[in-house]
Amino acid sequence: MERAIRPKGKLVIQIEGVTKEYKMGDEIVKALRGVSLSIYRNEYVAIMGPSGSGKSTMMNLLGCLDTPTAGKYEFNGKNVAAMEDDELAAIRNKEIGFVFQTFNLLPRSDALANVELPLVYAGVSGEERRNRALAALESVGLSSRVHHKPNELSGGQRQRVAIARALVNNPSIILADEPTGNLDTKTSVDIMNVFEDLYEKGNTIIVVTHEEDIARHARRIVRLRDGLIESDKLVSEEYLMKA
Amino acid sequence: MKEIKILFYEFNESFKIAFDQIRANKLRSILTALGVIIGILAVTLMGTAINGIDKGFDNSLSMIGYDVLYVQKWPWANVDDWWNYRNRRRIKTDYAEQLNKMIEAAPNTELIAAVPQGVNIKSVKYEDNQVKGVFLMGTTDEYPIISTVDLKEGRFFSTIESRTGRPVCVIGYDIADALFPNGSAVDKVVQIGGVQCRVIGVLAKQGKFLGLFSFDSQTIIPLELLQKHFGETNNDRVVVKIKDKTRTLEAKDELTGLMRRVRGLLPDQKDDFSINEQQAFKSTLDPIKSGIALAGLFITGLSLFVGAIGIMNITFVSVKERTKEIGTRKALGARRRTILMQFLIEAVSICLVGGIVGLLLAWGMSVAIGAAASSFPVSFSFDLVIVGMAASILTGIFSGFAPAFSASKLDPVVALRYE
């Protein structure tokens, strides 16, 4: 299904005819049955779908946490589908910033150390690491909470730390999996404002969610059902039509 | 270059994590480390005991002398065909004089001098005190050439006393102690097997030879005197000092040749004497010593092994508990080896802490044992510290590897979903 939008930037993600099968006991479950999707720089995409639609599998593939059973996946022109574990780890480290529903901060490290972590794995030296982490924390408005441990922060603040961590290595995409799933409505709005802000600054954002309210913040919505893309529309089209 | 830098940062990070982890689970870490502490303690104490035994053996062997050869009727090693030795002619003490003449005449000799030793067992008496079964040795004034022992007091006998067989004696430390509990033994007259001798010197304390035979309960008199009263025995011998203890074999060959001449043996006749040296003891004792060491280390090693299993178990638990964290780290770019290293270092850290504590305890205990019972052979050494540390690091790697490897192989998708 082709999309009626002229891309702003260069191609970041290109998926063609991707399938993903799992073995569950003796049965083979087809989570994705042939999906094609292109995402360009500085897009803001929401991936939606009910449970069992292949949404999580899609997110794992997009995040290079997993490789497809068949099909083509190129990330910035690199063939991800054929990569080994450690090569994938390098891609995740440099190209992808993850934001999880459960924040996934290291409980015994303070905000700064949490944000520094991807830079440790990237081999950035101590001082630069610190400066970049501080800058990232500042960009999400947490300059005053640098040395707080996760259990000393509110849910919204924790997610901001996680976003700072996702940003710190200047990734090609920010991949958020139900980023507001564990937050109340007001905090959710705050977090979505942070994403909006990042998008305005030129970042590419992919949000996986099942909440319409959250998806509405994006510019483009990809809907999955039964392992296939059901629709792929601009938010303006989608909601104008419904209105 | 970049790779080395990354490795360094990961290494650093791993240590930080290990430290945090140990601090966060204090009780658990202490209990786990206890296994290693006990293991290292046992192994190190065994090490001190082995060291002690080693030292004891060395001390004993040095009493015999490293650079002397003993010409005797019997070999020191155990022989099965004893009947072949039984009928050998006695070793005569005057061989020493003949040997000395030959040594003087030989241009490139490996030998220095030969000293005769007549041997007997007698009792030594002073007033009402008596020591029975004393090792009585008759020798010449040249005895100090072949002996390492010092005199505690007095002097050794002179050439004249030796030649003329004057009734003088030098007594061992224990005999002096037994016969003269208060005051000096020198110039007292003792009865040796009924012969009156004046004590002219007391030997310094030497200790027991392998805990069997005490060099401190011997008594030395001039050979002339010994043979006049007690005659010759099957145990008489000639002791020869050699020039270079690293050339014992050559010296032995030379001495064999000389002895064959002394004995007047024909070329087709077999040697009818034995040339003994401390090496013979060493080669008999070394297998025993290493047997003790191996058995001891094996048994104590088992306790270290139990400690290692404890570490392995707790590392598995740690991996399980932190599955989600592993998933997060992998999502953020941690590679397999990063995760592997993280858990290995955690296991090694606990082992190292355990090892250090164990070594400290072992050191304390060996000092305490040494102070309480000086005869007990313990000896703590720097080598033991190195071995102990290496053992604890290896234990950590051994026990941490399986769990760390399983952690490194976790699928990030599965790990992230783990609750």
Image (cartoon, coloured by chain):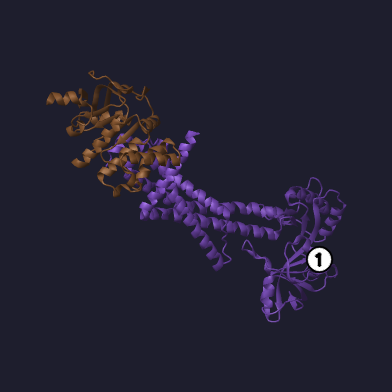
Chain colours: A brown, B purple
User: Image quadrant of residue A179?
Assistant: top left
Between B202 and B365, which is closer to the camera in this rendering?
B365
Q: Residues within 10 Å of mark 1 (few under 14, many from 20)?
A: some
Between B381 and B86, which is closer to the camera in this rendering?
B381
Q: Residue B154: give x, y in percent of width and height.
A: 76, 73
Residue on which disc 1 sits: B141
Amino acid type at mark 1? Asp
User: Image quadrant of residue B38?
Assistant: bottom left
| Image quadrant occupied by the C terminus of chain B | top left
Residue depicted at 59% across the width and 51% down the height: B287
Residue depicted at 45% across the width and 53% down the height: B353
Can residue A103 be seen here? The reply is no
| B176 displayed left or right of B311 | right
Q: Residue A218: give x, y in percent of width and height.
A: 23, 29
Query: Chain ID for label 1?
Result: B
Between B151 and B333, which is closer to the camera in this rendering?
B333
